[in-house]
Image (spheres, rainbow, N blue to C red):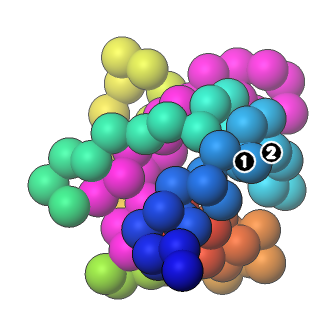
Amino acid sequence: MESTENKKNNDLLMLDKKIYGPIIIQSKSYKVIKGRKVLNVLNQENKKLILLINCETNELDVRIPGRKWMGSKPAKEEFENNLINDFC
């Protein structure tokens, strides 16, 4: 029987280049910083963004590389909830 952790890792492998609304996930890999998941993503204009997912509070934050974070906001849109569901 496959463990939950292995299943989650295998599911993340399938996320390569997945689209969530206006966001394109560049890579299945992410960093964990202070309990939050940090992903490199692209927006609709192919501009790089950094997305932070807080699984405990179901909040998202975003910034342009080299700029400040916009501020964590609760997931409202369906694609935001899908992002949290897939990565948390």
The residue sitting at 42% across, 68% down in the picture is: 5
**Considering depth in this image, is 24 or 88 the residue closer to the camera?**
88
Q: Which residue is mark 2?
A: 18
Looking at numbered disc 1 in the image, what kind of residue is underneath it? Leu
Secondary structure of residue under mark 1: loop
Q: Which residue is mark 1?
A: 15
Q: Position of residue 10 (x, y in %)?
A: 61, 55
C-alpha span from label 1 to label 2 = 5 Å
Query: From the viewer's perspective, is 46 left or right of 83?
Result: right
Secondary structure of residue under mark 2: loop
Q: Quadrant of residue 20?
A: bottom right
The residue sitting at 65% across, 59% down in the picture is: 11
Q: Position of residue 82 (x, y in %)?
A: 71, 73
Q: Position of residue 2 (x, y in %)?
A: 53, 74
**Considering depth in this image, is 11 or 52 the residue closer to the camera?**
11
27 shown above or below 18: above
The residue sitting at 52% across, 55% down in the picture is: 9
Q: Quadrant of the N terminus?
A: bottom right
Do we see residue 47 in this rendering?
A: yes
Query: Which span of residues is magenta-colored?
Result: 36-55
Query: From the viewer's perspective, is 25 left or right of 30?
Result: right
**Considering depth in this image, is 75 or 24 the residue closer to the camera?**
24
